[in-house]
Each structure stands twice: as structure tokens, then as C-alpha cells.
Image (tube, coloured by chain):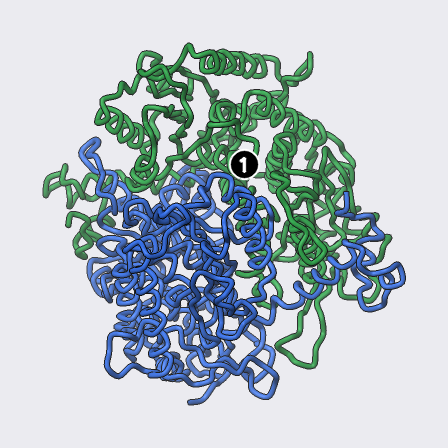
Chain colours: A green, B blue
Amino acid sequence: MEFRDFSDLSAVDQLQQLAASPCDLTAPNLLSPERFAGYRMSCCDFDFLYASQRIDDNVLAVLQELADEAQLVEKICSMKRGEVINRIEGFASEERQVLHTACRDIFRNQPDNQEATAQAKQQLELLQSFLQELENGRIVNHKGEPFTTMVQVGIGGSDLGPRAIFHALSAYARPNKTARFIANVDPDDAAAVLADLDLSRTLVNVVSKSGTTLETLTNELLVREAYAKDGLDPARHIIAVTGESSPMDDPERYLASFYMYDYIGGRYSATSMVGAVTLAFVLGIDQVFDILAGAHAMDMAAEETNIRKNMPLLMALIGIWNHNFLGLPTVAVLPYSQALSRFPAHLQQCDMESNGKSVTRQGGIVRWQTGPVVWGEPGTNGQHAFYQLLHQGTEVVPAEFIGFRNSQYRRDLKIKGSTSQQKLVANMLAQSLALALGSSSDNPNKYFPGNRPSSILLADQLTPYNMGSLLALYENRIAFQGFAWNINSFDQEGVQLGKVLATRLLAEIIGERGEQDVLDDDSPEINLLLQAGISVKK
Amino acid sequence: MEFRDFSDLSAVDQLQQLAASPCDLTAPNLLSPERFAGYRMSCCDFDFLYASQRIDDNVLAVLQELADEAQLVEKICSMKRGEVINRIEGFASEERQVLHTACRDIFRNQPDNQEATAQAKQQLELLQSFLQELENGRIVNHKGEPFTTMVQVGIGGSDLGPRAIFHALSAYARPNKTARFIANVDPDDAAAVLADLDLSRTLVNVVSKSGTTLETLTNELLVREAYAKDGLDPARHIIAVTGESSPMDDPERYLASFYMYDYIGGRYSATSMVGAVTLAFVLGIDQVFDILAGAHAMDMAAEETNIRKNMPLLMALIGIWNHNFLGLPTVAVLPYSQALSRFPAHLQQCDMESNGKSVTRQGGIVRWQTGPVVWGEPGTNGQHAFYQLLHQGTEVVPAEFIGFRNSQYRRDLKIKGSTSQQKLVANMLAQSLALALGSSSDNPNKYFPGNRPSSILLADQLTPYNMGSLLALYENRIAFQGFAWNINSFDQEGVQLGKVLATRLLAEIIGERGEQDVLDDDSPEINLLLQAGISVKK
């Protein structure tokens, strides 16, 4: 297996040439029935419709070459087996395996990585036992009542994925079970959540792999203080998900403890105990197994070498076409599903923290664009918000629509001959067409240029299984893009500088350092800020 | 008053030249105490810190020229007086005044536009009477109980602004008063909200200026059906905010009705009855007057011609510098305040629907970039998500930080010598510095290029007054940018094509049209989609 620079791939030259005259979606008859039928694939329960991308068979053929040349499938298979790919050759780096896929590779006798899957199974068994004890009344509050709410305290990967999935699947919540989330170091985040909670019926799930995350430890203490104020014993309410032997790995302080492992990055950890504990509390363990099964099915599908039969790989390559060759700096993820309202925020982390990089796997500076800006809000809401720019703005934004043929609650009404769900899906399809086709007009203000690329993911319903597939679809897509760009998608050195400066600045704000130290040479920038009179002491 | 093309302004040529070598924020001693002190202004309760933008006195001088040449302040004053500026010369267009500022110009004897302000005052008086009737028990439910929840049903401008402000200020909610929101035509949106509501204690506030918004009418019917199922009379629970003589202007169907006027665009309507009714129900009318007072103060400040004393104007011009001259396609709004978590979504509409345009006020095609992609999530959460890309990605994203010296709930804890609020603000300041300064390293993966522009808005606390100022700050900024780009920021023709195609597609999905019609020439694209087998009938 060889890691080559993106710009050294011969397919990249060819794609640059093809990008000089990309296919014109507004051309008469281009969007033919044959094109719609041909530029479509199915995987797990999802259809992927990509006829409204600015690609043709030539582009697809060279994208296949790119995939082959860069050995993208080989690399993802190697990742799943446990190769140490979280590294930069020749420089100090994390030097870790990347094995989030092992968490869901629990359905086969011969998983790709025996050891990691065995650990995942062990944790799932612990979780099942814990849930049984909650079920059968062996773990209850001081009054003997069952718990109704789980508050997950975590940030970044310990928050965004689990929170997005909870919102996506809360239609399936068991009676009298719900979840809340506290992430921000902003004390108002915890205060607002705690303001309307019955702490006596609440479990708090503190999640931090390192056991040292500033925000999470701070919020844990705020929560412990709230319990103490109510005369309740925190040790009967607080559980932990953390790395083995982290400072939080201290079962005496917690009602229960679950492990996560350093071969799983935070932003890929939703299918580990980081997501499983809260989701199983709310949804039940069977639904968690369904999520894992959906994710595993997509992981398996990512091993197909034909790009037109490998959904995450094809999405990755189309994304590269739009970003590196058509020069589009952002991508909008637009779920036509209110339940997926927080999924774009999860993808922002998963994608931008993975691929917002400038250094190759060999430590060179990249000479090509890496990860785009990812953003989005649910439709149809977005249609009444930012779609004006998508249709007529000077920034061209490739769109990824996600929709479902059926609703979750199935509480719908036929109004003017159609259900709300039909209106929802019709709007999604119409937007994709409108962006591609455009429209002419004698009134320049009613002119739509068209040729704005989009694709559609369509499934029957947002179920736990499909949520798992959707999550893994994007995880695999992101990994494929990182391999193509020859970057390490699994570290996050870019967050360090802000942390260091924040710590220094905090020390000055709270006056721990004397006058001498304030003028110390190693923090001149902060002295400047302070000298300029920006004080937070007020 | 003259509307000139952006590219015809002589300042634009000069700025292009200056942009060839923008100031280097990583240069030793550039970020000096003098720079921090000088590149800072105060307005209402906000400090605006812009030392970490890639500008210098030369750039600022030419930005002042641009403001003068394009008569930006003159134009906003003329807008506030009631000139018909929502128009495209020589073509059919909305031909309306733009008078959202009149809603808050209620504190002076001589408002800029007497008529609109008189109408705003009249509606506020109606609202006060309605609230008094709720207070003194004259309007109650069928059991004689007071109402505790208001559900706002609206979408786009009838949802995003009011929702963002509700989240921002819910710390100030009166006891036993809260709000929920239904926007999406996705039936699961209404179902999820209705699932855990006591309808008998709930008022529903249906908001649509036209009285014809598909999503809103559909959701109103879903809600009415839910009341009927519970044996409750909807007419005792549902109120309306709509345009005079719209199809919804029918007081017999509603418990109460309030008016909005067509001189107020949806995305600028948060300070009209569109936002005031729900916010006054939850917060009380005095807090709504505080919001209006804060917004009005910022509106007045926008009349200053010196750009260094006019916060919205200066922000607008710095945005133009970053977007048009430094070539940065997006802008991230990053509130260090969990309460502002939905404010970026509101700004997406307000900004991108206003300035995502390609046609000048005279109907020409723009030859310059107009509005950027606006996105963002709260810090510190974002630090654990997408900040990796902000610091080390290949896309450079200008950042707008928003922070407060004090929390809202004031339930904070000193941990390791500092409060959570101090940690929060220290992180925000540190991020701005880190983005600007960068950092060198022998390890290429730990290298930060710096020179990534940002600015900071800092106030004492997120109060109703400050929320009003912040809202108006961005509204005015957006209007200034639209005037500079010589576009009409007040229409939204770009949303029409999608609506038309959705209506056609829906007709085919529900089979209202015969086989003949399905193959009708005027909707070939939809036939294609259908022939390709994309069915939502399953």
C-alpha cells in the first residue's frame, strides 16, 4: 500500500482537463430518463441519485481511475483490519489504529479486527447488564423510583454524534425515557438544562476519552454541585464513559463505568459506548443493535472496488470533483427531515476536523484543496431561508439532499390532495431539479442560471438501522476523501494552539501570575490584548 | 441618491490594489497595544474589536471612500424614511418600502416614518391588551386555567428570528411560560412538538404574512385536527399574525389577530408582531420593549457617516474587504453563548436571502461577488468540531466571534481558579489570536499559518436590550452590503422556481393529472424523474 500525493495521480491531470468543460445540465434533453436511471445506485436501504451532478461517463471513468490509482478501497480495508494509519511519517504523531468500524463488526464470526471487536462486545454486554438492572428495579433512585432522563455531558465527538442520533430517533423513544445534553463551557448551557430537570429521576452520563476535557470536567462539577444542593448523592446518579486508566477511570466515583479505546477518534465514536449508553437508555438496546447493524452493512459496502457500486466511495469522488476540479469551496447537507436537524452539525465535526488539513501523510505541505466547509439546515425550512443564494447567488454550493418516503410518527394529513410527507419529498426533488435546470426569463431578476450540482439520498424511513447506515456512509466518505488527498484524517493538531493560548490568557485573567509574568516574553500577544483594555474581570 | 455599480466605484480599484499585499498579522509586533486600542469601537453595549482583521489605516481610509462614494448612509436613511427601495428599475418587481426599522422607532416624537410607526404602536397596544386579558384571567381555557405554552407555527422569517431570540432570552422567561415552534412541512416536526404538549394549556400562534404559506397552513390544519381529537375548540386556542386582508385575516377563526405589513420583509420581521407576540407571551411586554429599544439604538447608530464610529457600517465594509478583495467565500458567525445557538441560522436567512443575488438594481448581471455563505455554531462547542479546518484547513474562513462578560443565569462555579464564564471568554479571545498569529513548529503538522481574519463583538450580558442591538446590528450590516453591491436586498425571486416545480411534481405524485398530462410538454423534467422510477407513492 502506497500513499501518493493527490497531485501526482495521473487521474488528477485528466480530471483537470475534463473540468474545463463540465457537462451542461441545462442543455436540452441532457437530464434524460436514461441518465436518471443510469446515474443512480442503491445500497443498504438508500438510493443515491446523482444525475444532477455535473459529471458524465468520462468523468466517472477517470474518477474510477483515481480510486484505483490511490488504492482507496485497499486503504479503507487496511484501516478496518487495524493498520496504524493515524500518523504522519517521520514526525511525532498519534501513531494509532483507526477502528471505529470494529464497534459494529459484531455480527460476524471473523471480524476484521478480532481484538477491538471483542472489546466492543464486552462493553455492549456490560451495557446490557446495566440496562437490565435499571429495568428490573435493582438500580433506582433513593425513593425506589426508576430513572426517566439521561443527561449526556460531553463535547465535540462526545456530544455531536450522540445528540444528532438522539434527535433523529427520538420518535422511537421508550415511554418515559428521554435524554438531554450539556456540552458548552458556557455556564448557561448547564444552567438551562438543569433548570427544568427533576434531578432525582435523572442519570448523568459524563463522556470524555481523555478524562481531562476542560468543558466536560467543569460541567460534571456543576452537575455534582446541583445534586449536592438538592441533598442527593451524585454517586447514585452519575456514570462515566472514558478511556481505560484515564483520570475519570475511577469506578468508585461513578454508579457505572464504560470504556472507549484510543483507536476510536472522538468524531467517529458515536457507535461506541460514547453514543450507545445514552441511546440504549432512551431507545432500548435492540434499537442500538439496529443502528450498529445498519452501520456495519454500509462498512461492508465500502469494500466494493467498482465506484458505481460503492456508495460512500462514489459520494467521496463526486465531492472531490466538485471541490478540487469545479472549485466549489463548500458543501451543503440538506436533510428533508426535521429529525435530522442536528446531523449537519455532527458532519461539520466529522468532516471538517478530519479533512481540514494542510499536511500530507509524509509531512509535506499540500498543493491542492483539502476538506470543504460543510454546513446545512433541514428542508423545507432552508427553502424559506438561504435557498435564494443557492439558486441565484454568486457562490455556487453543491447540495446533498437526504429524504425519506415515509414519516416516523405517521401522523399525517391529506391537505389539498397530498400528505405533508408527499409535499416534503416533492419539494426536495423539485429543488434538485431547479438547481440543475435553471430557468430563463425576460425579467433578469427571475432568471436562474442552473448548473448547480446536487445529489439525493432517498430511503423509506429514518429508522435506527437507516440512521446507522447514513452515519457510516458519511464516515466512510470522509475517510475515502482523506486517503485521496493523502492527509491524515484522524488527528486534530489544529485545535492545540487555541487551547494553549486560552490557558495562558485564563491565567492572566484570573491574576494567578504576577506583574513580572504578565510581561513574560512567551505570551506577548495576550499582554497586548490586556494592555488594550479588554478585560473580562468586570 | 444614485445607485452605482460596485465595480464602477473608484474605491473598488484602489482596494483591489491594496488587496495584493494585505497586512501580515503574523509580522513581529504588528498586533501592538496601539493596534488593539485603535481598532476597536463601542456602540450601544457592544465593543467591536477588529485588530485581527487584515486591514490597516490605508484600507480603512479607502473603505471610508467606498462608503461615501456609494452613499451607504444616505441610502439607509432614505430606506428608514420610507423610500420605495425594494425594486428593480425597469422590470416588474415588488415595488415596496422597507420599514422594519419603523417597528422600533417608537420612542421618539418624530419617527422617520410616521405612518408605519403609528401602525406598529397600534399593534403593540393590541398586544398589550391581549396580554392583560391573559393576565387577569379574562382569556383562559375551558377549565378556567391560564395558558402556559405558546406554539409559533411559521416558517422562514416567521420562524427563524423569533426562535433565535426565544432561545437567546429564555433565561428571562416568566414563571410557567414557554414557547415551542413548528416550521417544517415534515409532518414529524408537528408530531414531535404535539407529542408532549398539554394542548388545553397551549395557545397556537400561526404566522404568515401572505396567509398562503404552504407549510404554515398545513401545520395549522394538523394542529386544528389535534385540538379536535382532544375535544377542544381550536377557536379558543389559535391566534393569527398575518397581513391585512390576507386569506388568514379572518378574526372569526382566531382567538386574536395581529397585523404585519408588506413593507416589512419576512427575514426582517422579528421586531414586528411576527416576533413580538410569542416573545411577549413568554418574557412579558416590558422585555419586548427592551428588545425594541436596543434595536432602535443600533438603527440610530447606523446613521453616522464616519465608518470608524458606525459599527454596522464598519462590519459591512470589513465583510466586503474579506469577501470581494481577499476572496473569502464564506463567513462563520461564532457566538460564545449557548443561548445564541440558533442565531447563526437566523442570520443565514437574513443575510443569504437578502444578498444571495446576481442582478443589480438596474437589472444588469453583477460582475462581482455578492453575499457570502454564512454558517456557524456556538463556541466552545465548535472548537471541538470544525475549528481544525479554521486553523489548518486550505479554506480560509473569516470568523465573527460574539461573546459576553457575564452569564445569564449567573449559576457559575470557580474551578481551578476561574469561573466557567471566564473560561468561555478566554477561549474566544484565544481563538481570535490563534487564527491571526499562527505558530511555527519543526513538526509540519503542528504549524499554524495564521493570517486568518476575525473580529470580536463583546458585551456585558445577553439581555433583551442587547439582543435587540445585536439583531439590528446584523440587519443594518446586511442592508449596507446590499447597497454597496448595488443589489436589491429585499426581494427573494430565487425561491420561486423550486416552488413551481414542487407544485407540478406534487400534482404528478398524487395522480391528479391523467397519463396524458404526465407527459405534458411543460413539465418534462418531472416526467423524467418519474420515469426513472423515483416514486414516493410507496
Is A32 on the left-hand or right-hand side of B149? right
Residue bearing the label numbered 1: A489
* Residue A45 pos. (x, y %): 72, 35
Is B530 on the left-hand or right-hand side of B350? right
Residue drawn at x 74%, y 49% is A50
Q: Is residue A364 visible?
A: no
Is A516 on the left-hand or right-hand side of A343? left
Residue drawn at x 40%, y 64% is B270
Residue at the far front in the pictured view:
B143
Disc 1: host chain:
A
Residue drawn at x 42%, y 89% is B1
Q: Secondary structure at mark 1?
A: loop
* Residue A514 pos. (x, y %): 10, 39
Amino acid on which the number 1 mark rests in the picture: Ser
Q: Residues within 10 Å of mark 1 (few under 14, many from 20)?
A: many
Q: Splitting the image into 4 quarters, where does residue B442 fall?
A: top left
